[in-house]
Image: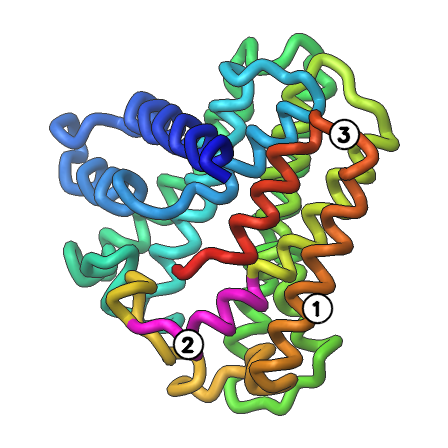
Amino acid sequence: MNDFQNWAGRIQQRTESALNHFLPPGDIAPEKLHAAMRYSVMGGGKRVRALLAHAAAELCDAEAEKTDAAACAVELIHAYSLVHDDMPCMDDDDLRRGKPSCHKQYDDATALLVGDALQSLAFQLLSQPGLHEDAASQLHMVHVLAVASGSRGMAGGQAIDLASVGQALNQSELEYMHIHKTGALIRAAALLGAHCADKVSTETLKAIDHYAQSMGLAFQVIDDILDTEADTATLGKTAGKDAESNKPTYVTILGLSRAKALAQELHEHAISQVSPYGEKAGRLIQLADFIMHRNH
């Protein structure tokens, strides 16, 4: 595990450095918008999606330098979703990553523009010349992130989430929501990392995709468990917010014990998808363990 922690620390550090490079400086016009973009992205978060991209890239022998842009693109989409998610018209949360949410630190209008600008920057990174030797492969990467971010992915999942407040969903309905809201971007992160390789087989892509599908759901189940068991200081966001908002979660539907068992089942299925690749899948397997045992 120490080996994984060292690797994860290096990837998190290189992701912070790359994001710092890609984000516009806060002292160029429009200064307030650029400062708010940096406030919302830098110096926080576990960078799980960037870790996923790099772990999948290692399995496929992709260069880390090429993976940086893809990893940062997913992190920018994730950051934009959090900025919008915290706004009063959505989940109305004042705390994110242990500090005031973007709309609280700045204002609602700025937070709205921050999300818009971060989304655009993500696609700017993925479409930049030279990211991939094969133009068709690079275009496919743009397509993967676009689908994962839109109405058939993350944005659609959030719409379902908002419509589900106070509703009695069953497990399959809850899974459908989270496959889109949380899982789509996690799948995209892993697939984009794989596509950074010069060539990758359909079989390998399928294995990585199935791994990411399972871990995307497991990530959400663990989130729901932590929302029940952890405190606000540990989480860096308001604990118990889902229950207070009368939102359906895996814990409210299944109970705490069954939710933990489901997370374990998803974890085991994910590992079974990539374990045939041996040492090359080591980081993906370690990352699955990390997601399972995180405390925030």
Residue 223 part of the magenta-drawn span: yes
Give the amino acid type for the residue marked by disc 2 in the picture: Glu
Mark 2, secondary structure of its residue: helix
Query: What residue is at 56 percent from the left and 9 percent from the top?
Result: 130
- Viewer-nearest residue: 51 or 27: 51
- Viewer-nearest residue: 212 or 107: 212
Sequence-earlier tag: 3 or 1: 1
Mark 3, secondary structure of its residue: helix
User: What residue is pinned by disc 2?
Assistant: 229
User: What residue is pinned by disc 3?
Assistant: 278
State if disc 3 and disc 2 touch (CB < 8 Å): no
Between tags 2 and 3, which lies in front?
3
Query: What residue is at 73 percent from the left and 64 percent from the top?
Result: 265
Give the amino acid type for the residue marked by disc 3 in the picture: Gly
Residue 185 part of the magenta-drawn span: no
Question: Which range of residues does the magenta coloring cover?
Answer: 220-231
